[in-house]
Image: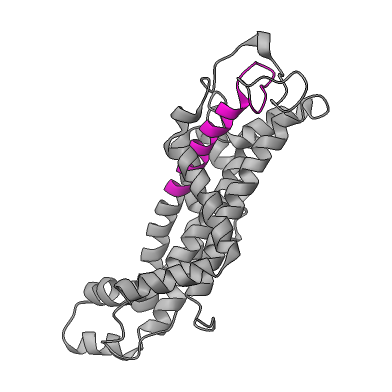
Amino acid sequence: MIAPQSSESSLPETGPSKSRRLVRLFLRNPGAIIGALFVLFTLLATLFGPLLEPHAATAINLNHALVPPVFEHGGSAAYPLGSDYLGRNLFGMIVSGTRISVDLAVLAVICSMAVGTLIGLYSGYAGGWLGNLLMRLTDLQMAFPFILMALTLMAISGPGLWKVVVVLALSGWTDYARIVRSQTLQQRHMLYVNAAQASGASRARVIFRHILPNISDSVIVLATMNIAVNILLEAGLAFLGLGISPSTPSWGSMVADGRNYIETAWWLTVFPGFAIFFSVMGFNLLGDWLRDVNDPSHGH
C-alpha cells in the first residue's frame, strides 16, 4: 500500500474508477478467478447447504452403509459421493462440514483481527511502557506452540464450537498485532497525521479516522489468508478429536473416521480432503491477488 504524503492523499480511492480498476486487474489474473470460484462454491454451500443435502447429514441407515459414489459400480444417485460406515450421506455431511468450517474460520478471524488490530494500533502509535508490554506478550504468544495450547485448552474445557473459536483466535491475533504495529509506525510520521495532530484531533480520532483506513488493505489481505489457515487448523483439531462435538459433521473428523476404511472405501477420506483442499486453495489464491493489488511494487 502506498503511504499518503499529504492529508488529501490520505483519502482512499473510491468511486467507479476504483471498481473498474479492481475488475480489470481481477479479470487479468487467472489465479484470482479460480480462487474466487472456489470461495463462491464454498460460500454457496455454507449459505444454502440445507437445500443441497439430499438426506439429513446425520441420518443413519445401516442398510446403505459404505455405498460407493454414483460413478462406481454399485453406486446410487441418492448417495452421489457415497455413504459412510453408518450409512450417512457423504455429500450431505461434507456440505454440513462446510458450514461448520467456514463459520468457525470466519468467527475466529473476526475475533483475532479485532484484538490484534487494536493492540497493533495502540502499540505503534502511542508506544510507551504499555505498548512495549503488549508487544512482549505478542512475542510470548508467538513462541507458544499452537498444538500444545490447543491440547491444553480443549482437554480442560472439552469440545465445543465457541471453544474452538477461542483457540483459533488465540493463535491468530499476534499476526495482526505485528503487521498493524509495523504499518502504524510508518504512518504516524506522515504529513497527513502531523496535520491532524496540529488541528487538535484526539489520539483516538487520529488512529481510527486517519491511520486505520490507510492500513486496512493489509489487514483485509491477512484476514483472507487467515480464513484458509483457520480451516486447516480446525480440520487438524477435528482430526485429533479436539474439535467440536463428534456428533457434528466436520471435514477433519470425516477424514479421521475414513482412514480406517481407506482400502475398501477410499471416498470417505478423499472427498472431505478435496473439500479442505479446494476451500483453502480458494482463499489463498484470492488473498494472493488482494496482496498483489495492494503491493506498491506491483505494477498496475
Q: Where is residue 3 in the image (x, y as percent from the top left)?
A: 40, 84
Q: Nearer the viewer, residue 279 or 100?
A: 279
> In the figure, 140 relative to 64: above or below?
below
Identify which residue is drawn at 51% across, 48% down. 168
Q: Can residue 35 be seen in this view?
A: yes
Q: Residue farthest to the left?
A: 200
Q: Count the numbered circles shown.
A: 0
Which colour style is shown? one colour
> In the figure, 186 relative to 164: above or below?
below
- Is residue 233 one of those drawn in magenta? no
Identify which residue is drawn at 36% across, 64% down. 118
Q: Write the start and end of the magenta stretch as one range.
A: 80-107
Q: State which quadrant residue 81 falls in.
A: top right
Identify which residue is drawn at 39% across, 77% down. 184
Screen quadrant of the N terminus = bottom left
Identify which residue is drawn at 31% across, 72% down. 16
Relative horizontal placement of residue 231, taking residue 17 as reference (left or right): right
Relative horizontal placement of residue 22, taking residue 240 as reference (left or right): left
Q: Residue farthest to the right?
A: 263
Relative horizontal placement of residue 188, taking residue 225 as reference (left or right): left
Q: Position of residue 150 (x, y in %)?
A: 58, 44
Main SS category, magenta section: helix
> In the figure, 237 relative to 4: above or below?
above
Q: Which of 78 and 99 is in front in this view?
A: 78
Q: Position of residue 71 (x, y in %)?
A: 72, 28
Q: Position of residue 230 (x, y in %)?
A: 54, 49
Q: Is residue 131 visible?
A: no
